[in-house]
Image (cartoon, rainbow, N blue to C red):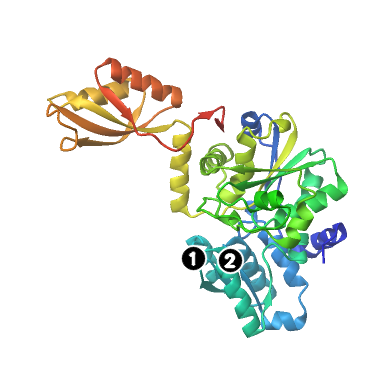
Amino acid sequence: MKPTLADIVEAKGRIADGIYYSPCPESIPLGEICGSRIYCKLDYLQRTGSFKERGARNAMLLLSDEQRRRGVISASAGNHALGLAYHGKLLGIHVSVIMPKYAPLIKRTTCRKLDASVILEGETFSDAYEHAQGLAREQGLTYIHGFDDPAIIAGQGTVGLEILEQVPDVEAIIVPIGGAGLAAGVALAVKSIMPGVRIIGVEPDRAAGFTAALAAGRVVKASLRPTVADGLAVGKVGELAFSIAASRVDRVVTVSEEELSLAMLRLVELEKSVVEGAGAAPLAAAMSGKLPELAGRRTVLILSGGNVDPLILTRVIEKGLVADGRLCRFTAVVRDRPGGLAKLAQLIAASGASIQDIAHDRAFSGPDITAANVLCTVETADREHIETLYKVLEQEGIHVVPVRSSVPAVKNGSTA
């Protein structure tokens, strides 16, 4: 049965005493980058770091006494599992979660700390889902779907109601799409009250299940590749969620890994916010240049989650710096004689760049025994600074071979 606006309104009251009413402030620096009036719905500030708590609590409060006694089970890449585990502990309901093996360590560890039973199964979400369904039948547990359950969708829709209260003149909302439960709930809530608000979905191009479903006119399984937005790596959106969202989401865009990394970096630098790839996807879309129709409009970005492994965050920040032209790598061919390496270092320093790492190689420098290759990783201000550095070195007789990255250039905060 499809949820209604009334269900979302009831869910808002039902979960109010256990869910943080997350703020939705305007961000001047992000607005300058995106060319819009940008507001950020900070739902990564929920107790377990994501919006998933909303649907989880709503669904669990609707269980019968017998269902509560037996316990619940679900498959999740992490955030739904965390929401179930936390609110299950608060409500005295035992929770079992089946996670695909790629689920981040921080999410697995936190679930166990919240007394949930955690089982790692399969390489994809589909593998984990099938295993969880089997255990639910065998053990008499209630399966709570992470994104394709009416109570879950109604709970997630409360994000939309809060946005309308906090930014009553909102013109557009960008929502991340994985299984589409959040998109369905927000679109249903917002379009029922203010149909003129544009709802824009965003998903990683490596897990574009909603885009594939729209193209086919029905839910289909899309190909999956590893993505920093692991919370969106579902591949096949929910049937119920798609039936609600397809007619209410005005547009869907996809973003690359580089765009996601850059968005995470911008949030760290400008908003002092650590947001996971899935949560940063709306900003990635806003910075991508793919939404010119939002220029000057009051736009809310739903920053849906903040559970990112610190090691992954380190790699993402480095990729973001490369995309920004603030980190470059090149091989410099220098004369293998006293002072050759010192001259290179002096020229780099004089240009205002800073050497992060340097490796001197003679054995693999080619047939010229008077030459040596020096692999340099250098911190720079931007891509113009990189080009200036290369010109200075070439003018001084030091041949430069840039180490090309798959990360595209950046212009005015957007990948170009």
Identify the residue at image location x=74%, y=69%.
Answer: 59
* Disc 1 packing (10 Å; few <14; some 14–19; many ≥20): some
Relative depth, front residue between 200 and 170:
200
Neighbour tally class for label 2: few under 14, some 14-19, many 20 plus, Cα within 10 Å: some
**Quadrant the C terminus occupies:** top right
* Side of 388 where 52 appears, left or right: right
Q: Position of residue 5 (x, y in %)?
A: 86, 57
At mark 1, the secondary structure is loop
User: x and y percent of residue 18 in the render?
Assistant: 72, 63
**140 with respect to 313 (left or right):** right
> Disc 1, disc 2: CB below 8 Å?
no
Q: Quadrant of the N terminus?
A: bottom right
Q: Position of residue 14 (x, y in %)?
A: 80, 65
Residue 382 position (above or below residue 318): above
In the rendered structure, the answer to whether residue 288 lies left or right of residue 12 reads left
* Residue drawn 74% across the image and 66% down it: 149
| Type of the residue with mark 2 | Ser
Q: Secondary structure at mark 2?
A: helix
Percent of width and height locating residue 33: 61, 30
Q: Is residue 296 left or right of residue 323?
A: right
Quarter of the figure with residue 353: top left
- Residue type indicated by callout 1: Lys
The one of 361 and 45 positioned closer to us in this rendering: 361
Residue beneath disc 2: 126
The residue where tag 1 is placed is 101
